[in-house]
Amino acid sequence: MEAFINNGLPYITLAGAVIGLLFALLMARRILGFDEGNETMRHISASIRQGANAYLKRQYKVVAVFFACMFAVLCVMAALGFLTWYVPFAFITGGFFSALSGFVGMKIATAANARTANACIGGLNKGLRVAFSAGSVMGFTVVGLGLFDISLWFILLKFVFKLEPSAITGAMLTFGMGASSMALFARVGGGIFTKAADVGADLVGKVEVGIPEDDHRNPAVIADNVGDNVGDVAGMGADLYESYVSSVISASALGVSAFAGDIKAMALPMVMAALGILASIIGTFLVRTGENTEQKNLLKALRRGTYTSAVLIALLAFPLTWFILGKENWTFYVAILAGLVAGVAIGAATEFFTSDTYRPTKKLAGSSKTGSATIIIGGVSLGMLSTAVPIIIVGACILVAYLVSGGAGAPARGLYGIALAAVGMLSTLGITLATDAYGPVADNAGGIAEMAGLDPEVRKRTDALDSLGNTTAATGKGFAIGSAALTALALIASYIDKIKAVAGAEPVDLTFNLMNPMVLVGLFIGACLPFVFAAFTMESVGKAAQSVVVEVRRQFREIKGLMTGEAQPDYATCVDLCTRSSLREMVLPTLVAVVTPIAVGLLLGYQGVVGMLAGATATGFLMAIYMSNAGGAWDNAKKYIESGAIGGKGSEEHKAAVVGDTVGDPFKDTSGPAINILIKLLSMVSIVFAAVVFKFHLFG
Amino acid sequence: MEAFINNGLPYITLAGAVIGLLFALLMARRILGFDEGNETMRHISASIRQGANAYLKRQYKVVAVFFACMFAVLCVMAALGFLTWYVPFAFITGGFFSALSGFVGMKIATAANARTANACIGGLNKGLRVAFSAGSVMGFTVVGLGLFDISLWFILLKFVFKLEPSAITGAMLTFGMGASSMALFARVGGGIFTKAADVGADLVGKVEVGIPEDDHRNPAVIADNVGDNVGDVAGMGADLYESYVSSVISASALGVSAFAGDIKAMALPMVMAALGILASIIGTFLVRTGENTEQKNLLKALRRGTYTSAVLIALLAFPLTWFILGKENWTFYVAILAGLVAGVAIGAATEFFTSDTYRPTKKLAGSSKTGSATIIIGGVSLGMLSTAVPIIIVGACILVAYLVSGGAGAPARGLYGIALAAVGMLSTLGITLATDAYGPVADNAGGIAEMAGLDPEVRKRTDALDSLGNTTAATGKGFAIGSAALTALALIASYIDKIKAVAGAEPVDLTFNLMNPMVLVGLFIGACLPFVFAAFTMESVGKAAQSVVVEVRRQFREIKGLMTGEAQPDYATCVDLCTRSSLREMVLPTLVAVVTPIAVGLLLGYQGVVGMLAGATATGFLMAIYMSNAGGAWDNAKKYIESGAIGGKGSEEHKAAVVGDTVGDPFKDTSGPAINILIKLLSMVSIVFAAVVFKFHLFG
């Protein structure tokens, strides 16, 4: 029994990962069996695919330079004895697999877009099946690859290199740093690309020239569709790979310190993840409806899938915890459950604040009656107000997880409980991501339907799928943000463990007293980082969008016969422009995220670093919710008006709502989600550079 | 010598206060000596005065209910032994004098508006003299009354009731809670009034009907001018009274714990304040120019005044510290100096980000070329980015003040140093407030010039004064925000002292470890408060503005001959509407500020309270800067375009900039400044309820 826990569990988790990957493969094959539609549709889809591939290729080149530099730095540090030699390699693999997750997701999404549009000709349910399968590929690739890598490293370090548990988790945290860095590049770069193209296409096409969205005469229309793939798919894939991996390895690391190096506490989060993959697979089979169904039944079908998975995990996690940790430690199950419930609750709160079926967004849409200024004020205040509910949910979750697991009497166990709550929250990621990632596919399918001139009924169906995707995306974002906060806290605890380990026999102050000015100044600086980061990314979107506007205006002016359809626009230039500007703009924010923790550490010492991490986690959480929810509500308020409410499409109210939506675009799709990654990357970098900071610092 | 320090200093500070008040009286008499202009001007000014008086009367009635309830609560607590009996009375006086500061400022501002307009007929310098005198009355009333009350209570408690130093500062902190509560009501209520009237008047008058700003046909024009007085004057007066008093008494309180009850450390902040009054009076004499001067010389004149005062204090604070604290403690002088320098630096940073003479605001104005969405995105990101510089300045100031004063070896002295930095920063408040408060007077004068149909040249002059006021207001805001952060930290330290005192012999954990979930959850909740508070206040402005819009539209529709000037609009209804809605809306935000610290304390204990206060201070500081600077930059970008840049007045770019300005209005004049008060009120309430929270709490 003990022997099985010690030696068998890593292989169990590896098996879970392989099952997830096989399921993804199965789904991918299923998609490729569908028909891509007529010649035009194939052609458009190919252009999108081409643009997306070209973007990713160039993005990887830029990222490779960063990774090469960091690898060199880590090697030097290893040579100087500040790190083990596993660290540089773990860093590289983390980045590689994070990129791979995004890449696979994008490949399948660009293969599925025309197929979804074509399937929609046959009905809503057929379309859903293709789009949801594409989402599933993404979902199970992310969790499958994530768990695969973790298990593999675990097996390698434990059975081949025979490291101590604390050394294993130490190396694996670096693996997380690689994943986070890659995720940040992907989210920021992709986010800038997609919003620059979107804003640029809309501002000239819809507002100035007056052609519909996704009209084939718009020179930025392909770039816009490429953006959905590189931002909302590849960016999100890399992002959630990072979230998933970080939550599992930070929990494992805290398990090691809570149970004095006992391998079982380290293994539990991984096995939980494997269990989650199985539960998610079962859930996906429940996502189906009758042929001639309505939109609201589709939502029910998706919900049935996610809720069933969650209930399965709630039921199975209890015997699992009992079996692995022993019956005297069953209360950790409550921590896992608290995380699971908190995730669902945050998702519900997000939906309440951003869906047009509830009062806040309806009221926001109403504020368009007095113009764009009032809808902006309304959205900003809605977003800020909406932070209160998730804060209370996460606060309650932290308290419950901590108190049931150990409380003040055994703080290390309490912190492990908090980390397990994050794992519980993300355990259903396979299916929640599937319901989330199918949205961009439907969005693309709509674009293709429009450009290929399919029956308007088809476009209506893709729109129905797309708007459903908005709702599920809101829920997905709730999970991502909530788990980011919990994981960030777990990583701070890991940082403190690391400092303890680095200090060895040297005296070290492990209370991080808020009245210590090093902690306090660190807190201030950390709290400021999400603001600065959001500013950088928004400014980048603005800059890139303006260059797109200029180019699109030029094409409309210079290409004769463009409006009459006699001449083709030059799509490639717009794609290229977005690519170049987003790649240029993604570097600075990422450098800030990597350099600041080192600079703060060298200046204020490890006390300052903990203050910084706590400050960044608190305001990062708030800013991410504020920006995501404000953006989501503006988007849905616009859709609500477009559906005929208030003034309807084309009215003054609608114009005001379009301004809100345009402001919301970088809020919800660039800055907001990137902040989630930022707060974890800050901790990861701090952990990796802990030894240096401990040795060299000016104050503190 | 020792005897003089012990017994003489309180009288010295009282003398300083009286000198300040006499100077204010002198200035007030001087203003009343100027002519109010023709019949129309007198009439308009009287209407404004009437509206403002009516508002304040009703506001005081609402506030009186709150104060009566709190007084009852405090009396019950005193009867139960949780507080001394001085506390309820100190609370009432704090509120009374804070209200009085705002009241006097408003009285003189409404007396000076027509006089300023009339003086502008004779030239720019004449106008400046009247408006600046009005600002000076306000500035010296605030500091004079503030220091007067502090000295009086000090003398009373020390020489009449013969209390111990720690009991004296304990009672005086309650005095601060009264001032903060009143300030919050005044800021929030006045802020909602002024922006509701402003937005309402502009949206219908300028945008829909197309009449100029301050046109007498606009039914909301008097309400708009009333708003300048009740918000920007009465609200600001109460606000800065609170800032001033809080910084001095929190420094005194920390002096008591740093010097083991020695009266000299307690007296130093008060004497510094007295010195500041004298230096400010000298500075005001330097604010004068030749008769036919240009605008930029006016700015030079104002700067000469404030900088001279600052230099005087920098020179005189050294011998003062040496004399009072003894030569072995001269390093506290460095802390005072750090605060003074930090205040000036934050002011400069604020100006850089919000003045149209620098790149950020110019660039923001340029982003109007692609419409209102891009100027909103630009302003939001400018505001967020601008938080970085003040954070670094305040962080450096905290470190310097702490390290020179005692550092880790003597943390109590270090915290006293931080509090002294806040006192240093606010020591020149007399003159900085004078240069700040004259803005609304000039603004009103412009309105009167317009409505009375004076020569356009006069309006140009009042506009020049007003736009100068925007620059000095930016500097003033920098001081207010910076000092709020330092004072809030000092108050947290006072809270901890209080807990120590309350605990007596009981065991108490005075390290506030960030890894303690009580602290952490408190931090999350505290960090969320400024977001929620900003949301509430913005929503209130939106609601109130919409009711004004509806009423103004009704009047234009129903009153025949209004546009042709044959019929008079019904000004009083708009004033009444603004009054009612702002009074209704100011209650909830204030209750949140009072109830939350008690609720968090009862739930999470004093550890949670400290976390909450630190979180609220960090994000409150950031949000206040973000909102003030974004709002200021939008305002000035609009003015920059109106001055003929980019598209000029009436262009599409100008329309986009007006949207930015409208969004910025509640940002910079309602939510932003109110957050400064919020973060201090939270601490004050926590201190007063410390004994209850220590005895009863669920966790922690």
Image (cartoon, coloured by chain):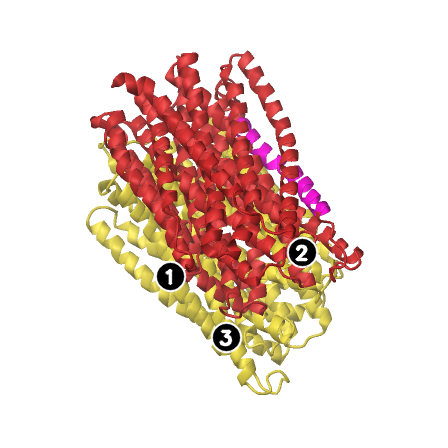
Chain colours: A red, B yellow
Mark 1 is on which residue type?
Val
Which comes sooner in the sequence, label 1 or label 3? Answer: 3
Residue A466: give x, y in percent of width and height. 50, 54
Looking at the image, is A532 positioned above or below residue A258? below
- Judge if badges 1 and 2 mark residues of a common chain: no
Q: Quadrant of residue A72?
A: top right
Amino acid type of the residue tagged 3 in the rendering? Val
Q: Are marks 3 and 2 in contact (CB under 8 Å)?
A: no
Foreground label between 1 and 2: 2
Residues shaded magenta: A572-601
Instruction: Calculate the distance from the C-alpha at mark 1 to the C-alpha at mark 3.
Output: 23 Å
Q: Residue at label 2?
A: A216
Q: Amino acid at mark 2?
A: His
Calculate the distance from the C-alpha at mark 1 to the C-alpha at mark 2: 54 Å
Task: Find out whether residue B528 is within the magenta segment.
Answer: no
User: Chain ID for label 3?
Assistant: B
Q: Secondary structure at mark 2?
A: loop
Q: Could you say which is closer to the camera, residue B642 or residue A305?
A: A305
Question: The numbered mark 2 sits on a residue in which chain?
Answer: A
**Above or below, B225 relative to A448:** below
Q: Residues at marks 1 and 3, common chain? A: yes
Between A27 and A576, the one lying in front of the other is A27
Q: Which mark is residue B550?
A: 3
Label 1 sits on a secondary structure element that is helix
Q: Position of residue B295 (x, y in %)?
A: 72, 57
Q: Residues within 10 Å of mark 1 (few under 14, many from 20)?
A: some
Disc 1: which residue? B587
Up the image or down, A263 lies above or below A669; here it is above
Closer mark to the observer between disc 1 and disc 3 = 3
